[in-house]
Image (tube, helix red, strand yellow):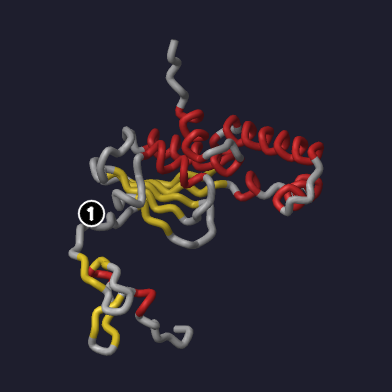
Amino acid sequence: MCVEKTPWEKAVEFHGHSCPGLAVGYRVAQVAMRELEEMRSPDEELVAVVENDACGVDAVMLLTGCTLGKGNLLYRDYGKQVYTFGSRNSGRAIRVSVNGEVLHRNDPVAADLRKKVLGGAATEEEKKEFYAYQARRTSQILDMPEGDFCKVEKIDFNFPGKARIFNSVRCAECGEYVMEARARIKNGQIVCIPCSDNYGRGW
């Protein structure tokens, strides 16, 4: 008998493992889908703006259908657990900011274990202890009251244009093809960004 996997199990499978960060994105995506009264986006009906590139973004992509490839997931490198979602169907949008206290509890024992595990210096017992701690934190995040987990605000949102397909042009230096909109001119020839030797003085 084949039992359908739960959304959480699918998120874990997609991400590769269960962890507190994935749980954060899972909760955020659930909030967004409920508040916007939306189903998973098969095309660009939903737009997500994520302000980090952490584990939770995988859950956001899986549950909402907002992906880089479709052009309806936009990444902002702000290092914040903040997520904005907009529905093209309704024109409504929300901003979800995760309570920082949820993620950054001061636990020196856990911090020491993390350092050892990630540094490859942990014993088998310390690894077990660390992963047990991670499992507890994951469960806490999944089960905590929403009001403790995050703040949700209805916002005005300028929807980005839908994804476009551009012509490709050949780089005169490396010979690889590059999207026309990302090409540069160097010594009068079309080149890609890596070959362009971008000029800048820190501005």
| Quadrant (top left/top right/bottom left/bottom right) for the C terminus | bottom left
Q: Which residue is mark 1?
A: 162
- Residue closest to the eye, 143 or 187: 187
Left or right of 59 in this view: 91 = left
Crowding at dot 1, Cα within 10 Å, few <14 / some 14-19 / many 20+, comes out as few
- In the figure, residue 196 lies in which quadrant? bottom left
Relative to residue 98, is residue 183 depicted above or below?
below
- In the figure, residue 129 lies in which quadrant? top right
x, y percent for residue 95:
43, 49
- Furthest residue toward top: 1
The amino acid type of the residue labelled 1 equals: Lys
x, y percent for residue 149:
57, 40
Relative to residue 160, is residue 41 depicted above or below?
above
- Residue closest to the eye, 155 or 22: 22
Q: Residue at x 50, y 33 (%)?
A: 13
Where disc 1 sits, the SS reads: loop
Number of numbered discs on residues: 1
Q: Residue at x 43, y 42 (%)?
A: 60
- Residue closest to the eye, 60 or 157: 60
Left or right of 184 in this view: 32 = right
x, y percent for residue 27:
50, 37
| Quadrant (top left/top right/bottom left/bottom right) for the N terminus | top left
Q: Residue at x 71, y 47 (%)?
A: 105
